[in-house]
Amino acid sequence: MKLFDVYPLYGINPVKAKGLELWDGQGEKYMDFYGGHAVISIGHSHPHYIKRITDQLGKIAFYSNSVQNPLQEALAQKLGALSGCGDHQLFLCNSGAEANENALKLASFHTGKAGVIAFRGSFHGRTSAAVAATDDPAINAPINRQHKVDFLAFDDFVAFGDTIDRGEHCAVILESIQGVGGLEAPSGEFYRFIEKKCREKGVLLIADEVQCGYGRSGKFFAFQHHGIRPDIISMAKGMGNGFPIGGLLIRPELKPSHGLLGTTFGGNHLACAAALAVLEVMEGEDLVRRAESQGAYFQELAAQIPAIKKVKGRGLMIGLEFDFEVAELRKKLIFGQRMFTGNAKNKKLLRFLPALTIEKQQIDLFFEGLKRALA
Ligand code: PLP
């Protein structure tokens, strides 16, 4: 049987990983400055993560959401304490798209409306309403285009005010820092304007923290840089360090009822063990603070490289902008320097999304490799 060929692949087959290092089948070592697309938060194969998951596997790996699962409660407690959103309610699912799909559905149930306001350059996933709120016609099929979505530009206060005043929308969804879109983010003033207008109009504000959340930006959630309080926060990627898990944090004013949302696999025992291990390591190794300090060190070094025209992003969610398209540079980095990096819709942007455990000397290695690749 053939694989359904939807991914352009690099000819590399990683068979082993530890921290920020990966090895292919020939024993060749690579540095992972991409974190498997911002997923690896605490480093590959962290010993505490391995132990937690292995121990859980020896007890019970899965049962359906028809029985009690104290691991879900433990996860909610820990996440509440570390994120500063302890008054929210937790709903667990399996991926970023599923988190956003449920966030939009919940907003629609709550308000009785169907319209959504999203932003230019957005990426929210590939399922029904999530992809409809994604600013990319190429990945929207006719079935997705039935959703009513208004795409607006960041910081266009007038367009936002006029659109939300129509009273047709259940939600405003935005990535607190855009990922695939290329590290774009609105001004703090615009965030606060969105929040104010949403409250005024009874529209729910959804912060998509799937990529920028979980400490990556130097705060637990990236919206926390702006002092706003979204109604729903969606999470995934860094949450399980590679184990598939996603979730929503939901404001206490939004009341649940049985059957409103649901999933077979979401919040299973093994996924909760993985997510608890991630939070325990984040707390024990102070990884949110570390993302901030290592990010600052990275920016210092980036400023010394003339070929880099602009540094975008926060913490360890960084984009380096060049005055040329970076596809060739990425190839040189991966095959010549054995370093994984990421790309974005903005073809001149090279993305740096390492595990939050990154050491300064590993950041030095990145710049040494980059300089050689640029020479
Ligand atoms: N939201 C954002 C901001 C993302 O970056 C992504 C994935 O890249 C998603 C949602 C979708 O997540 P998933 O691929 O887990 O469905």
Image: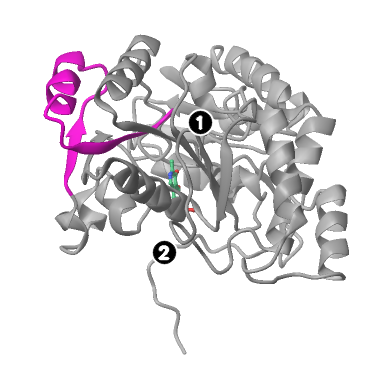
Circle on res. 270? none
Amino acid of disc 2: Tyr
Q: Secondary structure at mark 1?
A: helix
In the rendered image, residue 139, in percent from the top left (x then y), is placed at 26, 56
Answer whether residue 275 is visible to the viewer in this image.
no
Is residue 270 among what the camera can see?
yes
The extreme bottom residue here reads 1
Q: Which kind of residue does numbered mark 1 sit on?
A: Leu
**Compared with residue 52, is residue 280 higher up or lower down, i.e. above or below?**
above
Q: How is the image coloured?
A: one colour
Give the vertical position of 192 relative to 72 (above or below).
Answer: above
Magenta stretch in the rendered image: 148-177
When asked about the image quadrant of residue 230, the answer is: top left
CB of mark 1 near ligand 1 (< 8 Å): no
Which one is in front, 107 or 42? 107
In percent of width and height, residue 356 lies at 69, 33
Q: Which residue is mark 1?
A: 374
Binning the other alpha carbons within 10 Å of mark 1 as few (below 14), some (14 to 19) or many (20 upward) gives few
User: Which is closer to the viewer, label 1 or label 2?
Assistant: 2
Q: Disc 1 or 2, which lies upstream in sequence?
A: 2
**How far is disc 1 from disc 2 in space, using C-alphas?**
27 Å
The 10 Å Cα crowd at callout 2, few under 14, some 14 to 19, many 20 or more, is few
Q: Is residue 23 left or right of residue 347?
A: right
Say above or below: 234 vs 172.
below
Magenta highlight on residue 119:
no
Looking at this view, is 326 or 90 the one in front?
90
In the picture of the structure, the residue carrying the numbered disc 2 is 7
The x, y position of residue 179, in whole percent, is 43, 36
In this view, the residue in front, 237 or 66, is 66
Q: Is residue 248 left or right of residue 22?
A: left
